[in-house]
Image (cartoon, rainbow, N blue to C red):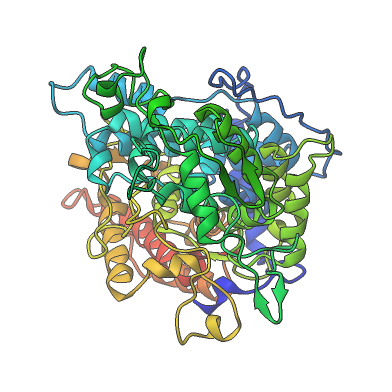
């Protein structure tokens, strides 16, 4: 696994003689079956006051992509390539695909959760419906780029249904995820405010009902600390390329406890939204039916009006809650750390665990100025992340595929369908039997894994490289994953096996092992399968004998063909070459 932290190198892995032909055959088949580009939807709906006005600069036309290059890009920008999406992209360009995705409308997770709730008996709605909506959108959603970026943002701006305060509020949690999605293609400043004032974040990081200082009581500092440490500027001052600034050979801290204390006073007096600012509403005893998804409002009686100093800024005494928050978030937004700090994490989530300083610098530059003088344009940042030459390089492994993405990849690659239409995959945390990861269920505000995690006493740590996803990887989770996919591949997934794959295209190739493996190479390994692995899987598949038809044993032929497909998929998804994404 040391390869998953390797730096980029020029060129790509060699293509075997059969690879290109099989890839072209897959693309041609998908195109002839109607797998072209989806029609462009209307502009994405946004919450009032948060317009998605960032311009989309024109990009020069690019040359046509090979199927392997298209698959490689889609593994970064979506929840996984399909034969149809590879075919569509191979006749277009990355830049055009991204521009098309920016125009696709948002599908609301809260609306999905609430529509399911209307069909369930009273009291049955739970966190399971949040997971169902996630997996439904990840598998069949048309706005793949938005959903993929939203999942990345959910690992930076973390809330978790593992928290007992949130687990009973599935519509609120879904609306928080929607808030990330609504702002994923907007401006980072609006994203920061949507996060800070969302009631689910207020509950999770305890600045909801936070009260001004009085006597020995001081404001809760939890959110004030984490909004700086995890969501905007980080612990240490950074150069534009993401490397730490040094003073006497040591990193320079971005903030002190005094800064946290000053910021904490900003986030006082915020609580549930509603038509009044009474004590009962502040405490939550008077309930507005929409409060779980309406931004928090300020209650002047509980907001600190003293002067507030942080990060070199002082808010004079006597300010309102709304004015104070604006100054605080503006200060964070303008901090020079934000571009490299957030940019590097987006690269890590989408492309590479160890981007070069030059890569980070290019993304940070796009954050600082989108080309039209706009700071924080998320569309410019996303383009910079996905269109960078380092992102296109396939010469070495860049990151470990996190478990959620592996399952989503399988669902999409084989056109999985849900009998109920709900995609009833629920908690998948158990490392022994499932994935060791569930979306929106991180164990803490520090996500499932830290961006700077490196396995101790490893070749990665010796090289100064990181592999965040390795923090949830160990002998139990490796064994659990293999057992999980060994069951899911032939049987399906979800509650009562609600979700079934469609292996019709693979079964049609079951008597042609070379073509079958080449298809899986494109769908699962993005064209990067080594000749050694390819030959090993072909040999293993060929060893399963397909007998001649027999009236006495009519099922033997079909069973053997299915077993060939199951084995080929299992060996591909179990291979280190698949797990370590290029």
Whether residue 532 is visible to the viewer of this picture, yes or no, is yes
* Of the pair 396 and 560, the residue shown nearer to us: 396
365 with respect to 218 (left or right): right
488 with respect to 145 (left or right): left
Q: Position of residue 403 (x, y in %)?
A: 39, 57
**Vertical side of 79 occupied by 296: above or below:** above
132 with respect to 139 (left or right): left
Q: Residue furthest right?
A: 60
Whether residue 549 is visible to the viewer of this picture, yes or no, is no
Q: Position of residue 122 (x, y in %)?
A: 13, 21
Residue at 79 percent of width and 39 percent of height: 370
Q: Residue furthest front?
A: 215
Residue at 63 percent of width and 44 percent of height: 314
Q: Position of residue 115 (x, y in %)?
A: 30, 19
333 with respect to 263 (left or right): right
Residue at 59 percent of width and 48 percent of height: 309
Q: Position of residue 395 (x, y in %)?
A: 68, 69
Looking at the rendering, in which quadrant would you find the C terminus?
Answer: bottom right
* Of the pair 493 and 325, the residue shown nearer to us: 325
Total number of numbered labels? 0
Residue at 31 percent of width and 28 percent of height: 171
């Amino acid at each position: 696994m040391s390869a998953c932290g390797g730096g980029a190198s020029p060129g790509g892995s060699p293509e075997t003689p059969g690879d290109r032909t099989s890839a072209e055959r897959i693309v041609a088949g998908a195109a002839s079956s109607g797998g072209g580009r989806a029609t462009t939807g209307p502009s994405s709906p946004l919450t009032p006051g948060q317009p998605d006005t960032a311009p989309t600069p024109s990009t020069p036309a690019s040359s046509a992509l090979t199927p392997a290059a298209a698959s490689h890009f889609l593994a970064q920008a979506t929840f996984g390539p399909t034969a149809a999406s590879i075919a569509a992209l191979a006749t277009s360009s990355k830049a055009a695909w991204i521009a098309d995705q920016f125009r696709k409308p948002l599908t609301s997770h809260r609306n999905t959760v609430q529509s399911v709730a209307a069909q369930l008996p009273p009291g049955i709605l739970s966190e399971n419906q949040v997971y169902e909506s996630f997996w439904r959108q990840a598998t069949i959603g048309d706005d793949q780029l938005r959903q993929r970026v939203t999942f990345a943002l959910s690992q930076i701006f973390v809330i978790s249904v593992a928290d007992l305060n949130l687990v009973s509020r599935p519509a609120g949690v879904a609306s928080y995820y929607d808030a990330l999605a609504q702002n994923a293609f907007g401006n980072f400043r609006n994203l920061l405010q949507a996060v800070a004032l969302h009631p689910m974040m207020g509950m999770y990081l305890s600045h909801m009902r936070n009260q001004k200082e009085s006597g020995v009581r001081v404001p809760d500092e939890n959110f004030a600390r984490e909004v700086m440490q995890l969501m905007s500027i980080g612990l240490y001052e950074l150069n534009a390329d993401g490397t730490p600034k040094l003073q006497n050979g040591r990193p320079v801290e971005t903030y002190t406890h005094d800064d946290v204390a000053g910021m904490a006073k900003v986030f006082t007096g915020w609580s549930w939204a509603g038509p009044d600012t009474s004590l009962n509403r502040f405490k939550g005893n008077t309930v507005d039916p929409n409060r779980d998804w309406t931004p928090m409002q300020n209650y002047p009686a509980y907001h600190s009006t003293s002067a507030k100093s942080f990060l070199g800024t002082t808010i004079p005494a006597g300010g309102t809650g709304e004015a104070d928050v604006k100054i605080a978030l503006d200060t964070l937004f303008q901090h020079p750390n934000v571009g490299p700090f957030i940019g590097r994490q987006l690269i890590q989530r989408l492309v590479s665990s160890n981007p070069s300083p030059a890569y980070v610098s290019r993304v940070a530059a796009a954050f600082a100025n989108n080309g039209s003088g706009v700071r924080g344009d998320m569309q410019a940042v996303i383009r910079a992340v996905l269109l960078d030459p380092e992102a296109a390089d396939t010469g070495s492994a860049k990151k470990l595929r996190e478990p959620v993405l592996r399952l989503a990849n399988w669902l999409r690659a084989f056109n999985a369908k849900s009998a109920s239409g709900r995609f009833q995959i629920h908690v998948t945390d158990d490392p022994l039997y499932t994935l060791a990861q569930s979306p929106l269920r991180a164990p803490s505000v520090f996500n499932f894994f830290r961006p700077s995690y490196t396995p101790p006493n490893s070749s990665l740590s010796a090289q100064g490289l990181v592999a965040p996803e390795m923090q949830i990887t160990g002998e139990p989770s490796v064994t659990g994953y293999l057992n999980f996919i060994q069951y899911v591949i032939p049987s399906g997934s979800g509650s009562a096996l609600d979700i079934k794959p469609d292996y019709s295209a693979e079964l049609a190739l079951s008597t042609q092992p070379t073509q079958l493996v080449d298809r899986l190479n494109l769908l699962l390994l993005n064209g990067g399968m080594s000749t050694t692995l390819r030959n090993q899987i072909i040999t293993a598949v060929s060893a399963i004998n397909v007998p001649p038809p027999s009236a006495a044993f009519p099922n033997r032929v079909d069973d053997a063909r299915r077993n060939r497909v199951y084995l080929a998929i299992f060996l591909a998804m179990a291979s280190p070459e698949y797990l370590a994404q290029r």
